[in-house]
Amino acid sequence: MAKTLAGKVALVTGGSRGLGAAIALRLAQDGAAVALTYTSSPQKADEVVRVIEAAGGSSLAIRADSADVEAIKHAVTETVKTFSRLDILVNNAGVATLAPIEQFSMDEFDRLIAVNVKGVFVATQEAIRHMGEGGRIIMIGSVNSDSTPFAGLSVYALTKGAIASFTRGLARDLGPRGITVNNIQPGPIDTDLNPADGPFADGLKKIIALGRYGQSDEVAGMVSYLASPEAAFITGASLKIDGGFTA
Ligand code: NDP
């Protein structure tokens, strides 16, 4: 049986670790050639590429800080230059800062907006220059855009709320071109950003209906579905994958 994404090309921002690495591996397993960006972990990015290539796939790691407009534009150009097209953009790179609002510095505020919002806008605007009918934009937002279960998350929630709104507007902008835009909103997922044995884990597990953290592979499965031809009629949606965290 043909793989669902055979012949497609994907770009995953922040693909060296965590959710992004699992998403890159899954899209490659589905048959796509996958470019991924990273900022600080070249070895981890190279390892994702190595695993994909060892399984017979094609992959490319590109250092590109999502806060740097020119670096993102370069990442899109490199992807298209290397693989000749671009069908799927996964806006995954994101940063979180947990701090009391009274002490939230302007520099941190600007950094969260730059990576989580402006970087997504730039990557999307560049990517759609190359996308045709059947193109896919997939955001990795957060349940925190709708629900912030404890203090200190307001700026992060603000950025992820912006992504949910941007997704709806973009669905209207790009619908006529046959490009879908969707926003996956994970709850607590076990990564370096939010380890299942970290300082908040016990409190969080108590309010997750399933009583456990999610795994990156589980989110990657949802990305795989949204990227597939089967999901062609889903657009403008924010879809939660949170183990009942917000149930
Ligand atoms: P991690 O911190 O584990 O991994 C982050 C990834 O993004 C790394 O590959 C990192 O690259 C890359 N990255 C970080 N900053 C930048 C940047 N400025 N430019 C380019 N790449 C960057 O995070 P997660 O995998 O947990 O999170 C991925 C996404 O999922 C984020 O958008 C996050 O907000 C969202 N999310 C995560 C949840 C969770 O519980 N884990 C829950 C809800 C949403 P490098 O290795 O080079 O540093």
Image (cartoon, rainbow, N blue to C red):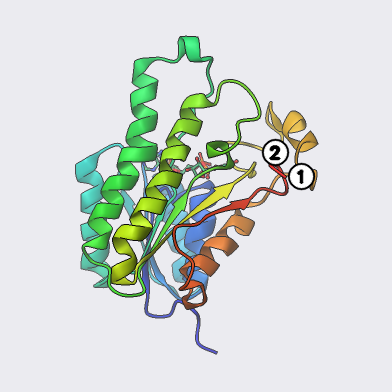
Label 1 Cα crowd, 10 Å radius (few <14 / some 14-19 / many 20+)? many
Dividing the picture into quadrants, the one containing residue 61 is bottom left
Where residue 152 sits, quadrant-wise, is: top right
Question: What residue type is disc 1 on?
Answer: Arg
Q: Are marks 2 and 1 in contact (CB under 8 Å)?
A: yes
Using the image, determine if residue 112 lies above or below residue 69.
above
Q: Is residue 57 above or below residue 47?
A: below
Whether residue 187 sits left or right of residue 50 in the image: it is: right
Q: Is disc 1 placed on a helix, strand or loop?
A: loop
- Identity of the residue drawn at 49% across and 79% down: 4
Mark 2 to mark 1 CA distance (whole Å): 8 Å
Whether residue 1 sits left or right of residue 42 in the image: it is: right
Image coordinates of residue 130 in percent, x first then y, are: 23, 66
Q: Looking at the image, which is closer to me, 153 or 60?
A: 153
Q: Using the image, tell me which numbered label, if any, was put on residue 196.
A: 2
Residue 140 lies, in percent from the top left, at 48, 49
